[in-house]
Image: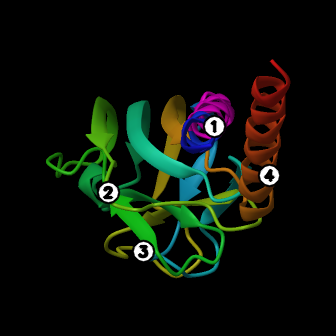
Amino acid sequence: MKHRIHRLAAATTLALAGLLGSAAAQAGSVVVDVAGAQSVNLLGEAGNTVWFIDIGAHAVLKALDWSVTLEAFAPSSLSEMQLSFGSASGLELFTFAPGEADFGSGSGSYSGSLDLAGLGIAAGADGKLRIEFSEGYKDLALGVAEGQWVGGQLTFDVSAVPEPASAALMLLGGLGLGLAAARRNRRG
């Protein structure tokens, strides 16, 4: 009897690991073309370009790679053009400036990457990632664009997280597979 219980537990564990492994395999990259986005006002103010990208419910951002070309309109500088992203609520945003060390106006191209693992930046239940293009400092009148994201892309490395209902179904499925294996062993 003791061996049957251990075999049942082992079968259930293996089945559940396989199911959860297949859910994790859904992770991938989300590429966003930034051409045409404008930095108009300070973060959170009307007029900025704001996009909502579907990355999956509760998906977690692991990394960001970027290769972008920006144009800052004088007297604004390339260092002031920033990008913020996080859940659709807009309450937990991560902000960075691709041209942070470039204090001139005009055009500039920038590329790089950020490790986001461990920061807990994730989409909410709606699966939406909010991206806002804004200014770190407002040089011109309100509502007047200070910069244009001329081209390029952002590539987010996303880790899928199963929804609680899906995880519960996987657990029940794993338990069912374990019970079926135990019945087979009892017959044989």
Tell me the CA gap for discs 4 and 1.
19 Å
Location of mark 4 (residue)? 172
Q: Amino acid at mark 3?
A: Leu
Residue visible at 79% across and 41% down in the picture: 179
- Label number found at residue 96: 2
Residue visible at 31% across and 74% down in the picture: 137
Q: Which residues are magenta?
A: 10-27
Location of mark 1 (residue)? 4
Tell me the CA gap for discs 4 and 2.
43 Å
Where does residue 61 sit, x and y in percent of width and height?
A: 47, 48
Neighbor class of circle 4 (other Cα within 10 Å; few <14, some 14-19, many 20+) is: some
83 sits to left or right of 170: left
Residue 105 in sight here: yes
Location of mark 3 (residue)? 140
Q: Amino acid at mark 1?
A: Arg
Which badge, 4 or 3, comes first in the chain's sequence?
3
Residue farthest to the front, as pictured = 1
* Element type at mark 1: helix
Which badge, 2 or 1, comes first in the chain's sequence?
1
Neighbor class of circle 1 (other Cα within 10 Å; few <14, some 14-19, many 20+) is: some
Quarter containing the N terminus? top right
* Element type at mark 3: loop
Residue farthest to the top, as pictured = 188
Residue visible at 50% across and 38% down in the picture: 156
* Element type at mark 2: strand
| Nearer the observer, 57 or 179 | 179
